[in-house]
Image (cartoon, helix red, strand yellow):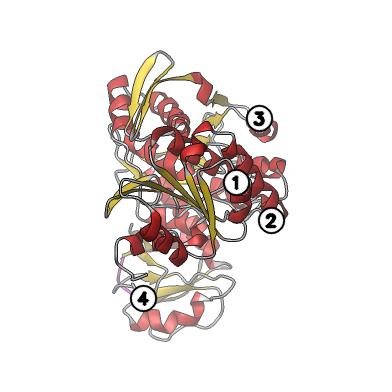
């Protein structure tokens, strides 16, 4: 989105160091590799990089000017604006756009399910409104700014996903987004290695209401830890899976009733029903009609690596390996085992569990061992921590194997799995389970 010169200065409080340009409208770029003529380069900084080291590159590539936080700048820059901190300036410019366009803002966080919930909400709300959303899972402060910068001027509803790895991060995003609606999908054990306890996780997630508008609405899973830490005096709506009546479950389809109205999802999993309840609540708060909400839910399709159903050389593969934590792994594997025949479950390490890593992997294994359908399933684990899951399943699953890497898994599948087997993949992103799909597809030779 374009900024006037005065908007750049007023939004960030920048000091004008140099202004030798007749241009009146500017785009912001943070990447010298993609910069276009006439844009303003805003250099970001991180633990291992400093964008101000590339000011010359930006100007040489055609940038009209740049933001700086130091004193040095390229002579060829026609516009130079100095700020105390460039990332804060990026956030301030984003907040300016939030007010300039003035959409209704729905902010979403949670230990799991937040990206799926965002996509479900988008599928529903876009049936009535011009809706813009966070791309993929770009849910940190930089992703937030990119979302606002790419927002069309006629956006009516903005959906912002908020991730966190520690205290203060969601509060920061709440400050600059000033949401009208805050949605908390859950508060589970994801990131417990960083935050130390389930209470701390719930407390960090509850930061989303810090800058929720006083006349806004909190929509949250009915979770006692969340209720304990949410500090908001406005309207609160709590939901849980038991509020819905599941009428039908089958592969790639679920029918349910919620508050006396019937809905359909073209995806399996009771947890997806629960995720959809926040979308239903939000849609009616925004004045949508039942037919619009029902149609939007039915139109939802999972994004890549989130219950992505593939047919590969005689195997059906369900790829749910975008990420994993104990709650999501238990829920997704349980759903898979209940719905599919000839099951082969492939599980990898779950990350960011800290000192609880062994305990939580064992807990998942014990839970899966209690599911009756595990008796007919083969289970493969990949990695030293996922092996703790498999250790709990000996004499409970049809067979249990552990491998150190994805190559070994593919060799086992190709040598031993029967055509018609349905394979389920679940692991943290660091396990790179897409390699298994690529190898089975023949893209990389085993």
Q: Main secondary structure of the magenta part?
A: loop
Secondary structure beneath label 1: loop
Between circles 2 and 1, the one closer to the viewer is 1
Q: Which mark is residue 227?
A: 3
- x, y percentage for residue 58? 38, 79
Between circles 3 and 2, the one closer to the viewer is 2
Q: Which mark is residue 354?
A: 2
Q: Looking at the image, is mark 2 or mark 1 earlier in the sequence?
A: 2
Q: Looking at the image, is mark 3 or mark 1 earlier in the sequence?
A: 3
In this view, the residue in front, 49 or 423, is 423
In this view, the residue in front, 291 or 173, is 291
Between circles 1 and 4, the one closer to the viewer is 1
- x, y percentage for residue 367? 60, 38
Q: Looking at the image, is mark 3 or mark 4 earlier in the sequence?
A: 4
How many residues crowd around disc 4 within 10 Å: few (fewer than 14), some, or many (20 or more)?
A: few
Residue at the (31%, 45%) spot, across then down? 420
Q: Is residue 253 visible?
A: yes
In this view, the residue in front, 243 or 203, is 243
Residue at the (57%, 67%) spot, across then down? 85
Query: Is 4 on the left or on the right of 194, as rendered?
Result: left
Q: Do the residues under discs 1 and 4 have CB atoms within 8 angstroms?
A: no
Among the 4 quarters of the image, the one containing residue 258: top left
Q: Which mark is residue 33?
A: 4
How many residues crowd around disc 2 within 10 Å: few (fewer than 14), some, or many (20 or more)?
A: some
Residue at the (34%, 23%) spot, across then down? 263
Secondary structure beneath label 2: helix
Q: Which mark is residue 394?
A: 1
**Range of residues picked out in magenta:** 19-24
């Amino acid at each position: 989105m374009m900024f006037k010169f005065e908007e750049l200065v007023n939004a960030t409080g920048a000091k004008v160091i140099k202004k030798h340009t007749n241009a009146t409208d500017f785009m912001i770029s943070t990447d010298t590799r993609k910069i276009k003529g006439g844009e303003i380069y805003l250099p970001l900084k991180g633990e291992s990089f400093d964008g101000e080291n590339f000011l010359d590159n930006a100007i040489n590539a055609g940038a009209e000017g740049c933001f700086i936080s130091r004193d040095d700048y390229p002579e060829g820059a026609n516009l130079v604006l100095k700020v105390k901190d460039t990332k804060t300036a990026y956030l301030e410019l984003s907040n300016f756009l939030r007010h300039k366009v003035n959409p209704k803002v729905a902010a979403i966080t949670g230990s799991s399910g937040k990206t799926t919930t965002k996509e479900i909400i988008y599928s529903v709300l876009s049936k009535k409104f011009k809706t813009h959303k966070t791309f993929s899972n770009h849910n940190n402060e930089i992703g937030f700014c990119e979302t606002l910068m790419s927002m069309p001027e006629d956006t009516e509803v903005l959906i912002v996903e908020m991730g966190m790895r520690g205290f203060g991060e969601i509060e920061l995003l709440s400050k600059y987004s000033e949401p009208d609606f805050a949605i908390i999908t859950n508060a589970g054990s994801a990131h417990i290695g960083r935050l130390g306890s389930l209470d701390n996780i719930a407390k960090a997630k509850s930061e989303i209401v810090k800058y929720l508008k006083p006349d806004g609405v909190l929509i949250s899973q009915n979770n006692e830890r969340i209720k304990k830490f949410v500090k908001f005096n406005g309207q609160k709506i709590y939901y849980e899976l038991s509020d819905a009546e599941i009428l039908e479950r089958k592969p790639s389809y679920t029918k349910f009733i919620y508050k006396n109205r019937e809905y359909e999802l073209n995806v399996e999993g009771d947890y997806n029903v629960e995720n959809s309840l926040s979308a239903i609540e939000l849609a009616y708060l925004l004045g949508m009609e039942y037919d619009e909400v029902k149609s939007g839910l039915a139109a939802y399709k999972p994004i890549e690596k989130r219950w992505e159903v593939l047919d590969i050389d005689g195997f059906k593969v369900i790829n749910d390996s975008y990420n994993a934590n104990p709650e999501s792994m238990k829920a997704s594997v349980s759903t898979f085992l209940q719905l599919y025949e000839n099951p082969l479950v492939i599980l990898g390490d779950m990350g960011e569990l800290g000192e609880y890593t062994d305990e939580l992997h064992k807990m998942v294994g014990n839970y899966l061992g209690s599911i009756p359908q595990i008796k007919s399933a083969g289970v493969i684990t990949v990695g030293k921590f996922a092996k703790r899951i498999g250790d709990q399943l000996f004499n409970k699953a049809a067979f249990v194997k552990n491998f150190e890497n994805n190559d070994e898994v593919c060799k086992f599948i190709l040598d031993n799995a029967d055509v018609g087997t349905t394979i389920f993949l679940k692991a943290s992103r660091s396990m790179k389970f897409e390699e298994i799909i690529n190898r089975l597809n023949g893209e990389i030779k085993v």
